[in-house]
Structures are given as C-alpha cells and as structure tokens.
Image (cartoon, rainbow, N blue to C red):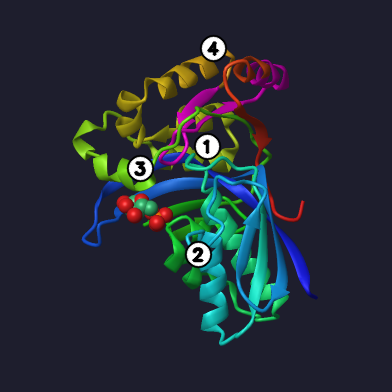
Amino acid sequence: MDKITIEAPAKINLTLDVKGKRDDGYHELETVMHHVSLIDKISLEKAPDITISSDSDLIPHDENNLAYQAAKLILEKNGKKAGVKIFIEKNIPIGAGLAGGSSNAAAVLLGINKLYNLNLSHQVLQELAGKLGSDVPFCLTNTSALARGRGEKLTPLPNIEKLHFLLVKPDFQVSTAQVYKEFDLEKVRQVPDTKAFLKAWQEYDIISLANNMQNVLESVCLPKYPEINKIKLDMLKYGALNAIMSGSGPTVLGLFNDQEKIHRAYTGFLQDYKEVFKISSYIRGE
Ligand code: C5P
C-alpha cells in the first residue's frame, strides 16, 4: 500500500466543565465529547520527506501544522527515515472549537500506522496523541467519551441513536489558549450536571440530554462576543431543543429532533452566515 485516505471528523462538546487550574498550566476538565459528520479528508502517500498541502490556504502548509508534527512524531519514534506526502481536504472551520487540527493530527497517526505497517497498539497511539494536544486522543477514538484530565483521560460511552445538530460558526476565530487564560471559576453561574447528562445518555432521553447540555467556557466568550448568544437564542427560536457553544468557541451547536425545524434553521442562518452545517453523529466506518 502506497496511499491511504482517512476521514477526520469534527468534535463537539455536549457538556464542558472546568474543575480548576492545574500546576502544569492546563485546566482540569470534565467534558462529554462527540464525533460529528463534518469531515476533513486526509490523503497520505509514501514519500522521502514530510510535506503538507491543502485545498485551504487558512491552515499552515509546513511544520506549524499539527498534522505535520503528528507525522514527524510517529515516524521518528519508529525509526523510519521515510516521510509522507499529506494532503488535507478542509471542511471543518478553523479556530472554531471543533478540534479540526487535532482531528487531522489523529488521522495522520492512524494513517501512517497503516501505511507503514507499524502495528502500533491503540494505547501507544493514544500516548503519541497526548503529546500533540489535549483533544487528539479523543479524535483517535471511534466512540463518544467522557473526558477528564486535560481531555486525554477517556471513558468511552455506548453508541446511541444518531443525534442531529445544526452548527453555526460566526465569522471570527477564537484562540483556545486565550479563552482558558481568561477563564475565571468565580464568573461561572451554571455548571453542567454531568451525572444527569450521562443518565439521559444511557436512557436515550433526548429532552433531558438537551436540558443538560452546558459549557462553562461560555462565561468567557458570551460577554466578549454577544453574537454567540444571539446565535444561541435564534437557534432556540428555530426550535432547537437546546443550543450551546462547542469547546472554546465560537461555534454554536443546536440539537434538534425535528427534520423540518432543522432545515428551516439551516436556510435561515445561511442568510447571515457562511459557515452553517447540518450534521449528525459520526461513527467511523459507517
Ligand atoms: O492541548 P492544546 O494544545 O490543544 O491546548 C491549547 C491550549 O488550551 C493550551 O495551551 C492551554 O492553554 C489551554 N488548555 C487548558 N486546559 C486544557 C486544554 C487546553 O488550559 N485542559
């Protein structure tokens, strides 16, 4: 095999709680992460060096790209002198709270493991992923998960029936590092009830699931960017069961259980926003 293409799905957070700041500067999280059907495609081809190109000029085409760093890490760790030609078909918005870069890096790890027959176990891949970024270990997995620690300690959740979402990304990006820097536990008014969310998940009680969706990082982003709150309110007007910001934002996700309503919301938001996506839960290989 000389070539392989791997799908790299976006991630959303259905709950996100920050428990406190750690000694290493990171924040201790408790968050439910979910793969969704907004997908980048990563093509890998055996080559003498690592090179990177994309149909998007919004991402770095050099070693600053996390996908490049993933290739370097896994090839060097395995004593491979060879490289890889990486092409990224970009569909996931950048700086959006959707883990696009992390998902691309995870796909490179999975792809190179196959392309070069490295036969690395899932656990070894997870360790490499953790070195690249907090969201990369989750992006390697096939299931939804409750994530703790920096985001790398994963408890898989059972698959449930597909959930349907509308994603709306306002026309600006936010820096994850900046959002965490500005996070102040004292400014958080409501924390997610993760236990209640997980109970609703087990019972597939979609109303309770929706009611328990909550993201404490909104306490940083909503006062700063009122547009995020406007999108949340509009999403509810269109009939979403609930709407929250994903990750460190600024993308808002609305959970719907009615195809007509989600379609009306989709066409409505498209009048004001370029980046609107009607998506659902993603399971690799389906
Ligand atoms: O791990 P990653 O490089 O994706 O994280 C980006 C930034 O977000 C980190 O540099 C850190 O400032 C912040 N972060 C955090 N706590 C986490 C995850 C990320 O403070 N659990």
Q: Amino acid at mark 2?
A: Glu
Q: Amino acid at mark 4?
A: Lys
Return the mark for residue 63.
2
Provide the residue designation for mark 1: 200
Provide the residue designation for mark 4: 237
Identify whether 126 is placed above or below 242.
below
**Cα gap from disc 1 to disc 4, whole angstroms:** 24 Å
Q: Amino acid at mark 3?
A: Asp
Return the mark for residue 110.
none
- Which range of residues does the magenta coloring cover? 241-266
Q: Position of residue 34 (x, y in %)?
A: 56, 46
Looking at the image, the residue that sits furthest to the right is 1
**Cα gap from disc 3 to disc 2, whole angstroms:** 32 Å
**Cα gap from disc 4 to disc 3, whole angstroms:** 26 Å
Return the mark for residue 17.
3
**Comes first in the chain, label 2 or label 1:** 2
The residue carrying pointer 1 sits among few (fewer than 14), some (14 to 19) or many (20 or more) residues within 10 Å by Cα, namely some
